[in-house]
Image (cartoon, rainbow, N blue to C red):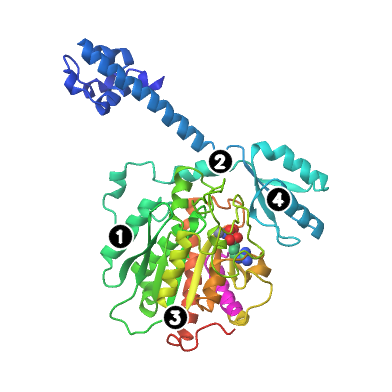
Amino acid sequence: MMLLRRKKDHHSSCPSSEPACVNFNVANTFRCWLFYDLRSVIAWTGKTKDCKLKMERVIFLLIVTSFLAVGHSVQKEAKYEGHQVWRIDPPTEYVLRAAKMIGEIHHLDFWKDPVAIGRPIDFLVAPDQIDKVRQSLESYGITDYTVFIPNVQNLIDEEMKTTKYSKNKVMRSAGRSVANFDYSVYHPAEEVYEWMDMVVDEHPEMADKVQFGITYEGRPLYALEFKKRASINPRPIIFVDALIHCREWITTASLLFIFKEMLRNPAYAHMMEDVDWYFVPMINVDGYVETWNGDRLWRKTRSTGPSSVCVGTDGNRNWDAFWSMPGASPNPCSYTYHGPSPFSESEVRHLAAYAMGIGEGVIDAFISTHSYSQLILYPYHHTAEPSADDAALNATGKLMSDAIFEVHGKRYVYGPGATTIYISSGTTTDWTYEVAKVVQSHTYELRDTGTYGFVLPAEQIIPNGQEYLAGLVALKQYVVANFVPSGSGSSPQN
Ligand code: 0X9
Ligand code: ZN
């Protein structure tokens, strides 16, 4: 075993000649363990019988905990070993319907839902499902499908390599500032919290951190409010959220970059100058912690009902707007479970109350950030009927999509959620539109279109942030040009 191998150069780190029993402790013993073999350590500490017994007990504990730790990390790291993402390009309605049925039979995690003829369908297949799903597809005569991502675990491993999570915390925190924060890697929840603190510390003239609630597991929910105090009032308000689906890491990462640009890059000073911003970087914090420490592909909240065998509710099906209508599942084990009641989820309920506290019809635009597929979706999501503001929403969709295209040539398709992708009910932006009366309510689906899906390489954070920022600049210009001070005319037309 590697740990027991003697390393000549490090002898000095262990007490050598006549150590007193009182000198040894767990940390010291473990350090010595790295450089000495077990027998040497016992011999070193075993000068008295009493001392030897103590030492043996410590070593036993160390062995047990080491095995537990190794077992745990192996299990965690290997969770998606052999999992594949398969793609079908449905050529007919029949294949589309068959894919939906197969999804239900095998409880598949659709990364891209069956939507329309010619629109790719992506779904995750576990190793033990490969044969069964293949047989199901073949029984429906579907032989034309591709293994789009051959091993999801490889993507997760690559992603982990680029994070700085494993580095020493003290080193990572040293010299931290908004300017030198590393925007090109993903950051765990505690670092996002730290980033928020740095923002308010460094920009007291315009930034406030507001706790608007707590998560199911008791973590604080924070928003950053940016209001340039010296500027004219009232000004338009844009509200941006991220991470209601916690596996969509790019949502938070790109927005940290965007707000840094808006705070520090003179070219974007007008963003803070002309508009008040509300920014919620992590809604589903509990789920986000789970994606870092357990299941990288967790999507839902972490709540459990008293009678439920499955954990979590889909935060984007839990809003009190057309709740439990088609496009949401009553099954607690489903990826789109709508929860036991509207706003059952602490995170969703608090976010809604916070947004409503700003005022009905007061917020000029609300963006809920998701990934992936490169889409700008606006209400309605629960029905294919167009909303009363369809034309205005379509116009801003086009403005934003065109602006995004200019940056790196990425196409973001825009349109009503229900007809552009699929029907879903109880969503954030149907609620912000219908209940909070925010006309310009949009759901962004960031990069990519499926090559990496939810496990987007960190090197794409900044490019994706740059194009999303261009979309926000276009939206901000529209909002400023059409601004009518609150309560007088900026609510939906219905
Ligand atoms: O299904 C969702 O909640 C969103 N897609 S995701 O892959 N990020 O989960 C899309 C919701 C937007 N609206 C409609 N589905 N109509
Ligand atoms: Zn999502």
> Given the image, on which type of amino acid does mark 4 rest?
Glu
Write down the quadrant of residue 48 in the picture. Answer: top left
N-terminal of the two: label 3 or label 2? 2
> Which residue is at a point 51% across and 77% down the rendered structure image?
438
State the extent of the magenta-drawn residues as a range. 393-410
> Given the image, on which type of amino acid does mark 3 rest?
Val
Q: Which residue is mark 4?
A: 104
Q: Closer to the camera: disc 2 or disc 1?
A: 1
> Given the image, on which type of amino acid does mark 2 rest?
Gln
Asked whether mark 3 lies closer than 8 Å to ligand 1, one says no
- Where disc 3 sits, the SS reads loop
Q: CA distance from mark 3 to mark 2?
A: 45 Å
Q: Closer to the camera: disc 1 or disc 3?
A: 3
Q: CA distance from mark 2 to mark 1?
A: 33 Å
N-terminal of the two: label 4 or label 2? 4
Percent coordinates x, y for residue 295 in the rendering: 51, 44
Q: CA distance from mark 4 to mark 2?
A: 24 Å
Q: Which residue is mark 3?
A: 362
